[in-house]
Amino acid sequence: MGAEAKSMEMKKIQTSSTDSWLSSDKVKSFVTDIKNEIHKVHWTSREELLTYTKIVIVATFTFGMAIYFVDMIIQAMLNGLSFLIQAIAG
């Protein structure tokens, strides 16, 4: 019974090693598939990339300045409210 258990264990090891995703045929197929998919990708041109980058920079700056000015207005209103409460309360 001990020899039979070892034999079954050996078969499991052999089966798991042949089913491994690291077998050379599977790895070659995987790399080939990756290359094929990369060739299908529509890469942006340099001009498109520069245009989109400029748009993102301008939009980021614009939104940042808008948030800054809204923050300044809110801060001025709170300072005015604080001054008014101090003037009333003494």
Image (spheres, rainbow, N blue to C red):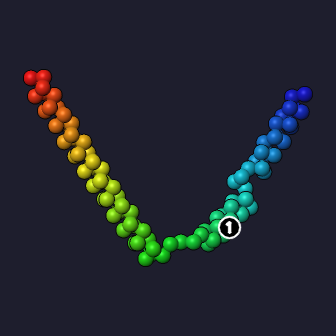
Three-letter amino acid code at disc 1? Answer: Thr
Q: Residue at x 23, y 45 (%)?
A: 73
- 52 vs 63, left or right, is right
Q: Which residue is mark 1?
A: 32
**Which of the pair 60/74 is nearer the observer?**
74
Q: Residue at x 10, y 28 (%)?
A: 87
Query: Measuring 48% from the left and 76% from the top, which residue is drawn there?
Result: 45
Left or right of 36 on screen, residue 66: left
Instruction: Please say whether residue 62 is visible from this viewpoint.
Output: yes
Q: Where's residue 51, x and y in %?
A: 40, 72
Among the 4 quarters of the image, the one containing residue 40: bottom right
In the displayed structure, would residue 20 be above or below residue 30?
Answer: above
> Where's the C terminus, which quadrant?
top left
Q: Position of residue 7 (x, y in %)?
A: 86, 37
x, y (%) of residue 24? 71, 60
Which quarter of the picture shows residue 12?
A: top right
